[in-house]
Image (cartoon, grey):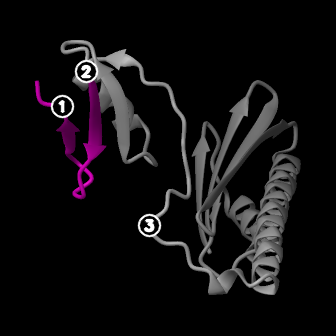
Amino acid sequence: MKIKITGKDLKATEAIKDYVEKKCERLQKYSEDEIDVQVTIKTEGINQVAELSTIINGDIYRAVTENKDLYASIDKDIDITEGQIRKTKAKKDKQNMSGSIKMSEDIRFGAENHKVENEILKTSYYQVKPMSSEDAKLILSERAKDQFLVFVNIDTSKVNVIFRLKDGKNFGLVEPEV
């Protein structure tokens, strides 16, 4: 478990560090992998604020609470984070369960014997908006999950496709011939 404690206008004492480490051990039971925890403590007026950011199994959990007692604020952050982790775990378990039920139905009805090839299995609908190729590049670079974007080029009034190249840094553009 990697724990980083940062103090803003407040010094992170050994007692606070030990307390955070002890409380973060509750989160370790949710993952066999390394857990990365970042804690920021600060003072705002008369209240002590604790911000806890945790990365477990690739998911990021964040909690921010304030209380007159810093230790109470840390406790509340741990409780909030633990609730977020349980909620995410339950959601993933439910998705896995529904997937396995569907798979067992496919096997029961013999779907594994009928392999579909060379067919359109999924259709996606989206809006094609008029924009410049530079605007399309900016939009695609903001969307990390998307590999391409279809748009109407405002300069040529033709449908274009901009796509992310395999290097992940550059883009390609598909334009119809005139």
- Helix, strand or loop at disc 1? loop
Whole-percent x, y for residue 18 in the image: 73, 68
Determine whether label 1 and label 2 are within 8 Å by CB.
yes
Mark-to-mark CA distance, 3 and 2: 29 Å
Instruction: Name the residue located 62 percent from the left edge and 71 percent from the top edge.
Output: 35
Residue at 57% in and 79% down = 115
- Distance, label 1 to label 2, CA atoms, is 7 Å
Q: Secondary structure at mark 3?
A: loop
Q: Which residues are magenta?
A: 159-178
Q: Where's residue 149, x and y in %?
A: 37, 36
Is 92 within the magenta?
Answer: no
Other-residue count near label 2 (Cα within 10 Å), few / some / many at <14 / 14–19 / ≥20:
some
Mark toward the start of the polypeptide (3 vs 1)? 3
The picture places residue 2, in percent across and down from the top left corner, at: 58, 70
Residue named by callout 3: 118
Query: Quick one: label 3, few (<14), some, or many (20+) residues within 10 Å?
Result: few
Task: Say which residue label 2 marks.
Answer: 158
Residue 64 x %, y %: 75, 41
The image quarter containing residue 97 is bottom right
Q: Secondary structure at mark 2?
A: loop
User: Mark 1 = which residue?
Assistant: 176
